[in-house]
Image: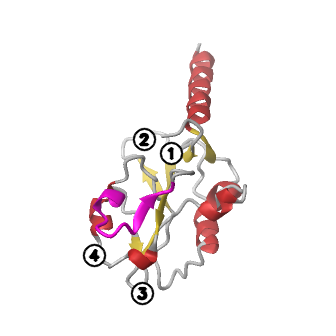
Amino acid sequence: MKKDVKIIDLDLERCVGCFACVVACMDQNDIDIEHEDRFRDVSVIRSKYSVTGQIGYVSLACMHCADAPCVVGCPTGGLSKDPETNLTVIEPDLCIGCHSCIMNCPYGAPKFGPDGKIKKCQGCIARIESGMLPACVRVCPTRALKYDTTENIEKMKKEKMLRKLWEKK
């Protein structure tokens, strides 16, 4: 993988479950919620053992895996890795509707539209190629979703952890 490849990352401590990312994704991809599955979803996480009753949220979409099992499982090449962005992208005209991508994806990211063709999050590749942020990242009011290089994200996470450790002293 290239060093400067960017990824979408979620900071679990910042996500408040507002669903703005879900709505932005649906709008960007013209998803009709009555007839199609959405590409991004927010799950509520409740702990049975939480004394404080805290609730957490996880915003998930396609993980654009470096070694994407859906790409490996697609017999027609309908799924591939974009060489510039490393996003997992689709070529719906090559889809034969065999569902092997769904069977191979551990996250359940591939969906099928009413036409029987694959649909999934493509990381807003058109927006990225135009120098814009992915729609979900752009609208996140708490900046829980970030779009940056893996190196910068790792650096931010390390700094955050160090601040937490320092505050506990």
List x then y, in percent, for residue 54: 50, 45
Q: Any mark on residue 44, and which?
A: none
Q: CA distance from mark 2 to mark 3?
A: 44 Å
Secondary structure beneath dot 4 equals: loop
Q: Any mark on residue 115, and which?
A: 3
First reached walking from the N terminus: tag 2 or tag 3: 2
Q: Which residue is mark 4?
A: 98
Q: Which residue is mark 2?
A: 50
List x then y, in percent, for residue 43: 46, 58
Amino acid of disc 4: Cys
First reached walking from the N terminus: tag 4 or tag 2: 2
The residue at the far top in this view is 169
Q: In percent of the image, x 63 and y 46: which residue is there?
A: 146
Amino acid of disc 1: Gln
Secondary structure beneath dot 1 equals: loop
Q: Is residue 123 magenta?
A: no
* Mark in front: 3 vs 1: 3
Q: In percent of the image, x 60 and y 38: which residue is there?
A: 4
Horizontal side, residue 27 vs residue 90: left or right? right
